[in-house]
Image: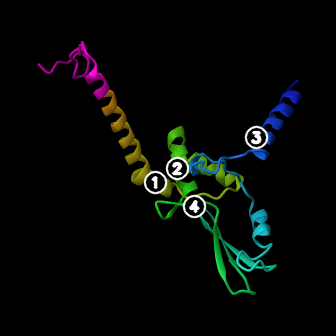
């Protein structure tokens, strides 16, 4: 029974990932993401030069939270850079910002997430970078969204007719009175 369920679950996962089709206009944050092993990526990049299509270029990899591949070709003497993802705000890899957002929205601990990544061998940024993303981008955007949402609710309530506003007068802690 359990083996049958596991087999069905595995087939569901395989069909979801192997046969996923995507609309070309899908925003980056909604497109599927995959884990790629270092050696497999290196084998792919070493197949041919991106510029002249010559066999056997030399590739080097740089870690920037995520990976950047630089390919040098001895045939055309050109260097080309391939990034695993686009940049957000002109300088941050999109995956780094999405990871920070996901950790924040899940209410998870960045140290635990990074520990899981370290145990699985996944490269990521540091906790310092996460907190910088929070301070500079995530918190201001969440606060802006909340303020906009709250203002729309207040405007909606103000536009209602025959509305009575009331409260219990407790603007202080229970048992105390500002009088």
Residue marked by disc 3: 16
* The magenta segment: 155-179
Seen at 78% across and 65% down, the residue is 39
Q: Earlier in the sequence, mark 2 or mark 3?
A: 3
Q: Are marks 4 and 1 in contact (CB under 8 Å)?
A: no
Residue marked by disc 4: 86
Q: Secondary structure at mark 3?
A: helix
Q: How is the image coloured?
A: rainbow
On the image, which quarter does residue 20 sit in? top right
Q: Earlier in the sequence, mark 4 or mark 1?
A: 4
Q: Main secondary structure of the magenta part?
A: loop
Q: State yes or no: residue 144 in magenta.
A: no
In x, y percent, where is residue 157?
A: 29, 22
The image shows residue 11, relative to residue 97, as above or below, that is above
Judge from the rendering whether residue 15 lies leftward or rightward of residue 65; answer left or right: right
In x, y percent, where is residue 47?
A: 80, 72
Q: Which mark is residue 100?
A: 2
């Amino acid at each position: 029974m359990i083996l049958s369920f596991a087999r069905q679950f595995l087939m569901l996962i395989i069909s979801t990932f192997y046969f996923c089709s995507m609309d070309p206009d899908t925003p980056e944050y909604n497109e599927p993401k995959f884990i790629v092993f270092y050696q497999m990526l290196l084998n792919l990049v070493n197949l041919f030069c991106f510029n002249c299509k010559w066999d056997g270029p030399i590739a080097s990899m740089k870690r920037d939270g995520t990976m950047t591949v630089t390919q040098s070709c001895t045939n055309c003497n050109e260097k080309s850079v391939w990034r695993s993802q686009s940049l957000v705000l002109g300088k941050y890899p999109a995956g780094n910002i999405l990871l920070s957002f996901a950790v924040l929205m899940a209410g998870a601990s960045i140290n635990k997430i990074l520990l899981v990544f370290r145990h699985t061998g996944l490269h990521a940024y540091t906790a310092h970078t996460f907190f910088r993303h929070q301070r500079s981008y995530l918190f201001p955007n969440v606060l802006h969204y909340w303020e906009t949402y709250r203002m729309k609710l207040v405007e909606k309530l103000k536009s209602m007719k025959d509305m009575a506003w009331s409260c219990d007068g407790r603007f202080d802690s229970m048992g105390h009175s500002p009088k």
